[in-house]
Amino acid sequence: MKPFLYLPLWFFKARLLGKKIPLQSVIFISDKCNLKCKHCTIYAKGTPTVKTFAEIESDLEYCHRQGSRFVDLEGGEPTLWRDGSHDLNSIIHLAKKIGFYSVTVTTNAARPFAGLAADSIWVSMDGVGAAHDAIRGEGMFERLVRNIEGCGHPRLSVNMVVNALNHASVDEAIEFAKNHPNIESIAINLHTPFPGTEALELDEATRRQVLDKVIAYKKKGYPVMNSVAGLKLMQKRDFKKYCWMANFVMVDGQRLAECQGKEAGLCERCGFCMAGEMASVMEMKLETLAAGLKLRVTG
């Protein structure tokens, strides 16, 4: 019941009183990874950073004090994280003990992750078959499917970041998510052109075509996590941003009140569709509010 009591109070403070209180946090626990994806520059680091359990505990306590009650653990590849006897489940249990209502983990599914105690799991899927492998490496899609099927988690979804290499696979990816018994839903994001990855950005016409396509699938009842209202805002780009609804703690310990895209000056070229969802929440779009509750509270 706690989330249902907290959320109306949070909304009252945020929307009516104008208080910028984060609702969710993204904590990067390590930049150690087991893949070399074409959209990512983390793997190029010679010596990856791996936070200690104590550092992550400090991050969690900080985010909770700020008002956040939902936390996403990311990397690198978070399932690789270890600190002595502590593993990823140790962090998840700690977050719940501190008071977070739900804990989400994002994995590339290149290694088994059965037994993960997260409330929900997001698997990064960049298309189906060859489309995924073109970005993640040969044989990675087959491995992803095998590990999804061996996971057994009841709340597993996939996230596709659409870019210049894989945009032709959007239809196939949405159909795959709909028809796979172990996948609850699919979220669509667009590539944000951080330095060194500009060539993967969609041109304006393709961006609009992709979003039109995703909206059409959503309206037909496909399990697309994005709301129609949020997707339409991403088409316009010039909507008012409320990205302070999520705060970020980077692997170097830097604490950001909004995503790293703002610091990089990329808000007008943003592909994080959560920006549209956040704005739709503040505009009180019922579909978006319902999608948020399903994602974070119900299950």
Image (tube, rainbow, N blue to C red):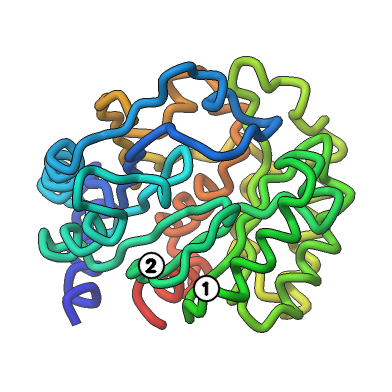
Mark 1 residue type: Cys
Q: How many C-alpha atoms fall within 10 Å of the one at disc 2: few (<14), some, or many (≥20)?
A: some
Q: In which quarter of the image is the C terminus?
A: bottom left
Q: Where is residue 98 in the image (x, y as percent from the top left)?
A: 11, 59
Q: Residue at x 23, y 73 (%)?
A: 3
Where's the N terminus, which quadrant? bottom left
Would you say residue 16 is visible in this rendering?
yes
**Spatial CA span between label 1 and label 2:** 8 Å
Q: What element carries label 2?
A: loop
The x, y position of residue 260, in whole percent, is 43, 27
47 to 121, vertically: above or below: above
Image spot of residue 292 (x, y percent): 44, 67
Q: Is 264 placed above or below 253 here?
A: above
Mark 1–mark 2 contact, CB under 8 Å? yes
- Numbered disc 1: secondary structure: loop
Residue 231 in sight in this render: no
Tag 2 or tag 1, which sits nearer the N-term? 2
* Residue that label 1 marks: 151
Could you tell me residue 283's position as x and y percent?
Answer: 45, 57
Q: Mark 2 points at which residue?
A: 116
Indicate whether 212 appears above or below 162. Answer: below
Categorize mark 1 by other alpha carbons within 10 Å: few (<14), some (14-19), many (20+): some
136 left or right of 65 in image: right
Q: Which of 39 and 90 is in front in this view?
A: 90
